[in-house]
Image (cartoon, grey):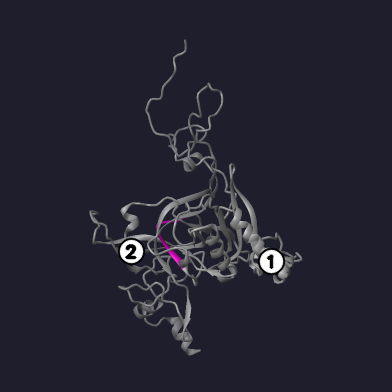
Amino acid sequence: HGIMSHRKFEAPRHGSLGFLPRKRSKHHSGKIKSFPRDGPGDAHLTAFMGYKAGMSHIVREMDRVGSKSHKKEVVEPVTIVETPPMVAVGIIGYTKTPRGLRPLTTVWAAHISDSCRRRFYKNFVKSKKKAFTKHAKKAETDDGKKALEENLARMSKYCHVIRVVCHTQTDKLNLRLKKAHIMEIQVNGGASVQDKITFAKGLLEQQVKVKDVFDQDEMIDVIGVTKGHGYEGVTHRWGTKKLPRKTHRGLRKVACIGAWHPSRVRFSVARSGQNGYHHRTEMHKKIYRIGNGYYKKDDEVITNNAKTDFDTTDKCITPMGGFPHYGIVKNDFLMIKGQTPGCKKRPLKLRKAAVVDTSRRASEKIVLKFIDTSSKFGHGRFQTFEEKAAVQGKLKKHYLAEQE
């Protein structure tokens, strides 16, 4: 009889099987697969959408009793997500069935912007641009208004879940993007479905700001698609050990991909293939700051959104020379602790925490002392251009400019 062989050293497996299949995501902008559970309270939105601008770091005093860093200054990495106001353009109602939720009906706003309508076309310029034109005409008439009320009445009678269809305002961003990203945002809270519908109807054609959805120090979930790395071998994709240097036919491989029998390769064996551009949900990210965009006050533009009570320099959140591969953040933004999935400019969906975080970290109050705005392209030595000029004095280019 054949004696079964055994491995010489035991070791845990490389890479998680919880994320199979490791393939390219279908949704470039992420997909919220489940919203937080509905509960009491006023009607409110549960998600938002932003664009990843880049990272920086902050200094704050930690307030965590029992920690070694309690009452000490800590430096922490943060991600800046630009979140211009979104526009609500529709309401969609779902009924509960034994097979899950079923959309009952959708109500659209009378006026829908071009950036949103572009999303319904492959080639907007060459099209006849007819999307929603008949709807807009009908919405102005008495019949249209009556149909709207009838649909809303049907929703309040049969629906259990109400979601608002919102789109981002891409014209406010500094990107080449013209098509808006559209998403459904669930309305939670409210005493009845009618309350939710009344709340949603009040939002139609209105701008929804990020501070209306999230609060300072709140824990949120970030949903997005990770950076793509293309077709990658097992060493990088699964983190398997490299073979010894003298190995014939390459060493960034798996030495044995399975026993003779069963005479198949098992799914759990590390193989090469697509790495990155996977759909991921990262839970419990803390909001360190909900920043205001540039705004006008007494005919001057106020841009000091990176100021803190301790560092009173007037400076904006954009680092010197702009965020690399992104540009200047002029709109409202979220500062989130740690990193988020995806590359710069990638759309991210931000959702209220689906699972309540009860840790001490979640309830901590954040008071920022300093936000770094030095250049992220090289060795940033200065926080502002004024500081740079004060240290360096006049340069050759300044003298040349004066002569001209």
- Secondary structure under badge 1? helix
Q: Nearer the viewer, residue 153 or 234?
A: 153
Picture residue at 55% right of the left edge, 29% below the top? 265
Indicate which disc, 1 or 2, sits on the residue closer to the N terminus.
1
- For badge 2, the amino acid type reads Ile
Picture residue at 43% right of the left edge, 19% below the top? 5
Mark 2 surroundings: few (<14), some (14-19) or many (≥20) residues within 10 A: some
Q: On screen, 223 above or below 85?
A: above
> Which of the two discs, 1 and 2, sits closer to the camera?
1
- Residue 363: x and y in percent read 33, 58
- Residue 292: x and y in percent read 45, 72
- Residue 111: x and y in percent read 66, 70
Q: Which residue is mark 1?
A: 146
Picture residue at 59% right of the left edge, 57% below the top? 156
Picture residue at 38% right of the left edge, 78% below the top? 314
Q: Would residue 336 be counted in the magenta stretch? A: yes
Q: Which mark is residue 293?
A: none
Over which residues does the magenta segment extend? Answer: 333-340
